[in-house]
Image (tube, rainbow, N blue to C red):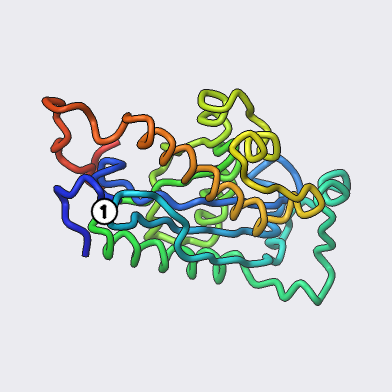
Amino acid sequence: MAEKNNLNALNARFRGFYPVVIDVETAGFNAKTDALLEIAAVTLKMDESGWLQPDETLHFHIEPFEGAILRPEALAFNGIDPTNPLRGAVSEYEALHEIFKAVRKGIKDQNCNRGIIVAHNATFDHSFLMAAAERCGLKRNPFHPFATFDTAALSGLVLGQTVLAKACIAAEIPFDASQAHSALYDTERTAQLFCELVNRWKRMGGWPLASGTDTEAPLVTDGEE
């Protein structure tokens, strides 16, 4: 279990939050009515020197929930055929249950207090995950209900790019456009991008904070925002 006061530990870097990179592929833009079709998650860890790196990966194709809208233009964009039996799709409940279980374990192992979603244009992914969790009646959602780390915004600040492919190229992370809009591929690249942004700030001297700065503020608890 990670120590609370070790500045090279994951829990100290993000005020007790446990960052998990998420990407979803959907059948539209409305999280309440449009189908969630694919989701991937990459957990993160710190090495002994405090460098952030990807850890474990989970990936699921998902069956559209009953009554879900499948917008043809969205399916044409991501290339997903929801009726293809080779997808090996599972229910929203099964996919999120497994992701939430892994995240809760990571939170405990890293001595964190709550998960936080990292995503590119994070509001979109966060809204679909939260809507699906509500539909499934999953009460033990480990993620913060509204806070996120958005790699589009961070990339705009650090790299001058907000499109995932362009941000990866600017960060010298290989990006294969032919694999884009696969939740698994995009999540893996977003995880690498987020790690590079965090580690670049450390290399530039931005972390740990300057001597005399309060770096031992209380970790976030479930009741805090």
Q: What residue is drawn where x is 36% and y is 49%?
A: 51
* Left or right relative to 168: residue 223: left
Q: Position of residue 30 (x, y in %)?
A: 68, 41
Residue at (33, 57) in percent of width and height: 47
Q: Residues within 10 Å of mark 1 (few under 14, many from 20)?
A: many
Q: Which residue is mark 1?
A: 112
> Looking at this view, is 190 or 83 the one in front?
190
* 136 w.r.t. 196: above or below: below
At horizontal 34% and vertical 67% (from top left) the residue drawn is: 105
Q: Can you give x and y, in whole percent of width and height, for residue 45 in the image?
A: 37, 57
Q: How many marks?
A: 1
Above or below, comparing residue 10 to residue 1 in the picture: above
Query: Position of 111 compared to 47: left or right?
Result: left
Q: Front-most of 150 and 190?
A: 190
Q: Secondary structure at mark 1?
A: loop
Pick the quarter of the image with the N terminus. bottom left
Horizontally, is 46 left or right of 43 in the view?
left
Amino acid under disc 1: Cys
Q: Percent from the top left, x then y, of residue 145?
A: 41, 43
Q: Quadrant of the C terminus?
A: top left
Residue 40 picture quarter: bottom right
Identified at 87% across, 44% down, the residue is 73
